[in-house]
């Protein structure tokens, strides 16, 4: 039997380079091995957990993230692309799993804890948001996923997903498939900083390069990037470790020899920021050009995108129904023959 890969994106905005190196690139690679059954989900219900008053934003982005996936080379012939709310079986699974999780465990989840702190939620955190690790367990188990590629901010969520699976199986007997999750191998890829040098590329910080940005926008953003603030004159020694320009190069540059040479030269002194940025722009454009072209095609053929998601959702739902049946049987909510 083929292994199953499942992953998802919250449709809260267009996807950016951080998503690309953190997760998108890996899924295309997995898809192209031909070794997996693969599902990619536009996680609109999860997006709503902290956007209840902002439903328009989610609605607008459900197809945007689908197009982001298609444009990086996800092939609907090989991969099932679906929308979360089109599979209501997920919510029923969530309900059974909610009984296996305590409030204190949810509050201790580092990803959730960080969000509570950052957004000043305290006790006013929406319950749906607090419990999204539980619904994520439903997303993963509903397709018998064995492999879940995610960005490293999702590690605590996936740890809790595995915990829920173990609790369920222990309590009700072997029913759910225990998933493994994978995160990017290199540090540069697991957390791409913003173009402003802040720790993380994020929409709210306004420091992203989007997959859908045009050439001029990418150039402007790259040229304005934060570098080593102590690298004032060209002949000064430069830092490459906390320098987003070099972190991006590490994540994107396939000519490793040239990358190592530039890095060494910059550290030694004598290499100007402008030259490095120009090279980075070139490297990024190599990645982004084909993505942009595919995206243009799908932008002009929305009816194809809609059909892909419609067919994918139907297929995904069929699978989730089977799993739900198994789960109902194990829990014992099966009254009629
Ligand atoms: N929580 C993920 C994120 O914020 C998105 C997501 C939803 C997901 N359901 C999933 C990822 C299931 C992997 C598996 O990026």
Image (cartoon, helix red, strand yellow):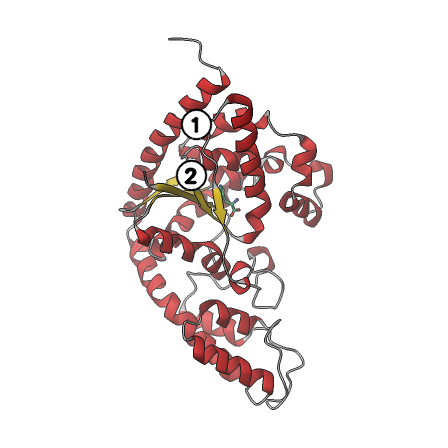
Residue at image point 50% right, 70% down: 250
> Which numbered tag is attached to residue 293?
none
Q: Quadrant of the N terminus?
A: top left
Packing grade of label 1 (10 A; few <14, some 14-19, many >=20) is: many
Residue at 64% x, 43% y is 112
Is residue 10 visible in this depiction of the protein?
no
Does residue 199 show up?
Answer: yes
The quadrant where residue 310 appears: top left
Q: Is residue 242 left or right of residue 94?
A: right
Asked which quadrant contains residue 242, the reply is bottom right
Q: Does the closest atom of ligand 1 sit within 8 Å of the Cβ of label 2?
A: yes
Q: Which residue is mark 2?
A: 145
Label total for image: 2
Determine whether the residue tagged by mark 2 lies in a helix, strand or loop: loop
Q: Nearer the viewer, residue 205 or 321?
A: 321
Task: Name the one closer to the observer, 334 or 128.
Answer: 334
Picture coordinates of residue 11, whole percent (x, y): 47, 46
Image: 299 above or below 214: above
Left or right: 288 in relation to 126: left
Q: Which one is earlier in the sequence, the residue at label 2 or at label 1?
A: 1
User: x, y (%) of residue 216?
Assistant: 43, 72
Image position, residue 315 (x, y; %): 32, 34
Q: Label 2 to label 1, Cα distance in Å? A: 16 Å
Residue drawn at point x = 29 percent, y = 38 percent: 311
Looking at the rendered image, the disc whose residue lies closer to the viewer, 2 or 1, is 2
Percent x, y of residue 64: 41, 50
What numbered label is drawn on residue 89?
1
Mark 2 surroundings within 10 Å by alpha-carbon count, few (fewer than 14), some (14 through 19), many (20 or more)? many
Q: Is residue 71 above or below residue 123?
A: below
In the rendered structure, the answer to whether residue 68 lies left or right of residue 52 reads left
């Amino acid at each position: 039997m083929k292994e199953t890969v499942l992953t998802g994106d919250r449709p809260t905005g267009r996807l950016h380079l951080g998503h690309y190196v953190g997760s998108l690139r890996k899924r295309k690679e997995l898809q192209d091995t031909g070794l997996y059954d693969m599902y990619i989900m536009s996680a609109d219900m999860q997006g709503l957990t902290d956007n209840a008053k902002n439903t328009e934003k989610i609605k607008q982005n459900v197809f945007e993230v689908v197009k982001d996936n298609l444009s990086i080379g996800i092939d609907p012939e090989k991969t099932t692309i679906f929308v979360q709310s089109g599979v209501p079986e997920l919510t029923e699974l969530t309900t059974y799993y909610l009984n296996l999780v305590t409030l204190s465990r949810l509050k201790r989840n580092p990803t959730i804890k960080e969000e509570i702190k950052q957004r000043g939620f305290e006790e006013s955190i929406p319950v749906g948001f607090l419990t999204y690790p539980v619904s994520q367990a439903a997303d993963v188990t509903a397709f018998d996923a064995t492999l879940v590629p995610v960005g490293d901010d999702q590690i605590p969520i996936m740890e809790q997903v595995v915990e829920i699976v173990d609790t369920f199986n222990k309590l009700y007997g072997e029913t759910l498939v225990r998933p493994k999750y994978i995160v990017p191998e290199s540090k540069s890829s697991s957390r791409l900083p913003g173009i402003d040098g802040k720790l993380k590329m994020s929409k709210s910080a306004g420091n992203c390069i989007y997959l859908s940005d045009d050439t001029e926008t990418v150039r402007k953003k790259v040229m304005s990037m934060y570098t080593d603030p102590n690298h004032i004159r060209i002949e000064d020694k430069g830092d490459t470790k906390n320098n987003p320009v070099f972190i991006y190069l590490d994540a994107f540059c396939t000519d490793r020899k040239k990358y190592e040479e530039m890095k060494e030269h910059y550290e030694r002194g004598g290499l100007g920021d402008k030259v490095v940025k120009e090279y980075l722009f070139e490297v990024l454009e190599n990645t982004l050009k084909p993505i942009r072209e595919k995206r243009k095609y799908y932008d002009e053929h929305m009816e194809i995108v809609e059909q892909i998601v419609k067919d994918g959702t139907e297929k995904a739902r069929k699978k989730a129904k089977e799993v739900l049946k198994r789960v109902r049987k194990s829990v014992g909510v099966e009254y009629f023959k």
